[in-house]
């Protein structure tokens, strides 16, 4: 994905176009930029057109829209948010028998009773990548990013950027304070992470809202160190910007993964939901997804066909070292994380 296309993708979110109309019998509530030809090949071949898309900027917006009565057939939440859809009674199970590539989905991406239980399979993971330390290799010594404590370093006051994302910010804070999972965080552990974020806050130049914004902040030299997704880093590297991506700091990095939920009482044709998910999971989708968005496909068999050097170039090759997976958290904890993060950003 070029720097220009990344910016255009960001602009699509900011303009918040209500929908990209196509197939009237199937609607997808999705992240901007996901109407990729290469992952919709078999859907279009069978149905004659792409689905109708409605876009969102983040998971909170997506859930708010879906829970407020917006009619869609499927939604593309990240894993940490799937429980919200189940708790609200908005979704119904998928039928794996109708998904030929289901058996090739990486088992680690389904390892939660929120995703799969005796009642069925509630979530089909499709994509994943990593969040770690992006840094300007001309201005920042590699030794400085060997630890997540670089974000507190007074040397970089006003020159760091963090994502305006509850999941990514708290995964950073928990890792920095000694946790590698967030499933059962105690009050003391939560306070330690919140205190750490408060120490970091004065160093923050900006909380970025999308990879294009993060890339621009680094490209202009305003920001030297960022907690970043891999795609923005790969884009900067493709533009010959001196950027590094430290995925093995002492405390670890984080991985996120997203997929699709099947909406209950959906307006379109149910069979098209399976045409859509099967098109996404097809082996041919793996190179297209990596090329266009910089993400890995959940289909392990398909990913094994991609050359190792291409995975490394996109920073989606396996990470050796501690990893915090952004799995579902209880609703009470999510509300607490959101409230505390908003207070920290406001300076409280």
Image (spheres, grey):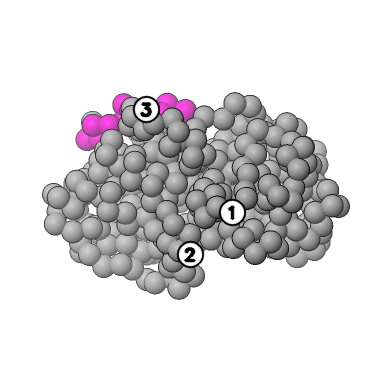
Name the image quarter holding residue 246. top right
Q: Is residue 203 visible?
A: yes
Crowd band around label 2 with a 10 angstrom C-alpha radius: few (<14), some (14–19), many (20+):
some
Depth order, front residue of 121/32 = 32
Question: In the rendered structure, which disc, 1 or 3, sits on the residue that comes first in sequence?
Answer: 1
Where is the C terminus found, in terms of image quarters?
A: bottom right
Q: Is residue 94 visible?
A: no
- Magenta span covers which residues? 98-109
The residue that appears at 49% across and 40% down in the rendered structure is 313
Depth order, front residue of 309/155 = 309
Depth order, front residue of 271/141 = 141
For label 1, the SS is: loop
The numbered mark at residue 112 is none
Disc 1: which residue: 241
Is residue 282 magenta-colored? no
Is residue 108 magenta-colored? yes
Q: Is residue 326 left or right of residue 39?
A: right
Figure check: 155 above or below 300: below
Per the model, the C-alpha gap separating discs 2 and 1 is: 16 Å
The residue that appears at 28% across and 35% down in the rendered structure is 283
The numbered mark at residue 7 is 2
Q: Is residue 142 left or right of residue 57?
A: right
Disc 3: which residue: 304
Depth order, front residue of 292/13 = 292
Rendering coords of residue 285 (x, y %): 30, 42
Question: In the rendered structure, which disc, 2 or 1, sits on the residue that comes first in sequence?
Answer: 2
The residue that appears at 49% across and 35% down in the rendered structure is 312
The residue that appears at 59% across and 43% down in the rendered structure is 131
Question: In the rendered structure, which disc, 3 or 2, sits on the residue that comes first in sequence?
Answer: 2
Q: Is residue 184 left or right of residue 307?
A: right
């Amino acid at each position: 994905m070029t720097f220009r296309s990344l910016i255009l993708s960001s602009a699509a979110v900011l303009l918040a176009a209500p929908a990209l109309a196509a197939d009237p019998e199937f609607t997808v509530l999705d992240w901007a930029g996901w109407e990729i030809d290469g992952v919709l090949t078999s859907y279009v071949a069978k149905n004659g057109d792409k689905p109708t898309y409605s876009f969102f900027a983040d998971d909170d917006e997506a859930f708010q829209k879906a829970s407020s009565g917006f009619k869609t057939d499927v939604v593309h939440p990240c894993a940490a948010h799937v429980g919200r859809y189940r708790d609200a009674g908005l979704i119904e199970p998928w039928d794996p028998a109708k998904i030929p590539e289901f058996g090739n989905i990486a088992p680690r991406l389904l390892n939660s009773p929120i995703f799969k239980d005796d009642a069925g399979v509630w979530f089909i993971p499709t994509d994943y990548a990593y969040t770690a330390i992006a840094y300007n290799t001309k201005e920042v010594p590699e030794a400085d990013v060997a630890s997540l404590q670089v974000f507190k370093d007074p040397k970089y006051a006003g020159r760091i950027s963090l994502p305006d994302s509850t999941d990514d910010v708290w995964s950073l804070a928990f890792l920095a304070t000694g946790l590698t999972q967030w499933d059962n965080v105690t009050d003391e552990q939560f306070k330690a992470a919140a205190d750490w974020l408060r120490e970091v806050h004065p160093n923050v130049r900006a909380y970025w809202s999308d990879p294009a914004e993060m890339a621009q902040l680094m490209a202009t030299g305003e920001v030297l160190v960022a907690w970043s997704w891999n795609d923005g880093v790969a884009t900067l590297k493709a533009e010959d910007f001196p950027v590094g991506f430290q995925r093995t700091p002492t405390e670890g990095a984080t991985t996120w993964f997203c997929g699709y939920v099947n909406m209950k009482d959906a307006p379109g044709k149910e069979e098209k939901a399976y045409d859509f998910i099967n098109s996404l999971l097809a082996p041919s989708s793996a190179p297209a997804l990596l090329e266009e968005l910089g993400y890995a496909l959940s289909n392990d068999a398909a990913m094994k066909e991609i050359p190792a050097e291409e995975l490394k170039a996109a920073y989606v090759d396996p990470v050796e070292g501690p990893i915090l997976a952004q799995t579902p958290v209880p609703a009470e904890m999510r509300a607490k994380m959101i409230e505390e993060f908003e207070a920290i950003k406001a300076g409280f």
